[in-house]
Amino acid sequence: MTINPIELLRSRYGQNLDFDIEWNACLTTLLSHRSIRAYRPDPLPSGTLELIIASAQSAATSSNLQTWSAIAVEDAQRKAQLAALAGNQNRSSSVHYF
C-alpha cells in the first residue's frame, strides 16, 4: 500500500494541505489514527491483551511516570454493572472486555 501524505492530510482535515517537510512513518501513523466505536463480539486471541498492555506501558508520558492501571472484566453481570456506572454507553455492553 502506497501512503499518500496529501491524501492523509485531506482525509483528516477536509482540505488540501501541502507542507514542505520530509514525510516519515511517524507522521503516517499519527495521521492514520482512527477511533473505533463498534467492536466485534468474538474474544481476543490469546496474548493480545497482554501485548496491548505491554505496548501501553512502553509509551512515553509527559512526566514519564506511566501511572495507570488496567482491569479486564469478562463476567457479563459485572460488565453490565460497570456499563451502568459509565452512563449506559452503547459500546460499554458490546465489548468482550470492559
Image (tube, helix red, strand yellow):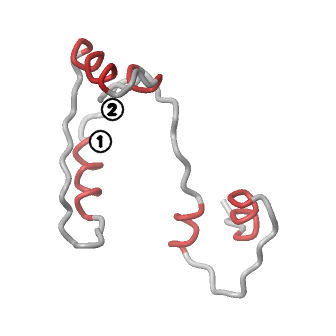
How far across and down, in percent of the image, does residue 23 sit?
62, 80
How far across and down, in percent of the image, does residue 38 sit?
51, 30
Please, what is the three-letter code of the amino acid marked with disc 1? Answer: Thr
Residue 94, image quadrant: top left
Give neighbour class at mark 2: few <14, some 14-19, many 20+ (Cα, 10 Å).
Answer: few
Q: How many marks?
A: 2
Identify the residue at image location x=19%, y=37%: 71
Question: Is residue 75 shown above or below 30?
Answer: above
Residue 42, image quadrant: top left
Question: Is residue 58 shown above or below 49?
Answer: below
Q: Nearer the viewer, residue 77 or 29?
A: 77
| Image quadrant where one finds the N terminus | bottom right
Q: Which residue is mark 2?
A: 44
| Image quadrant where one finds the C terminus | top left
Residue at the far right in the pictured view? 16
Q: Which residue is mark 1?
A: 48
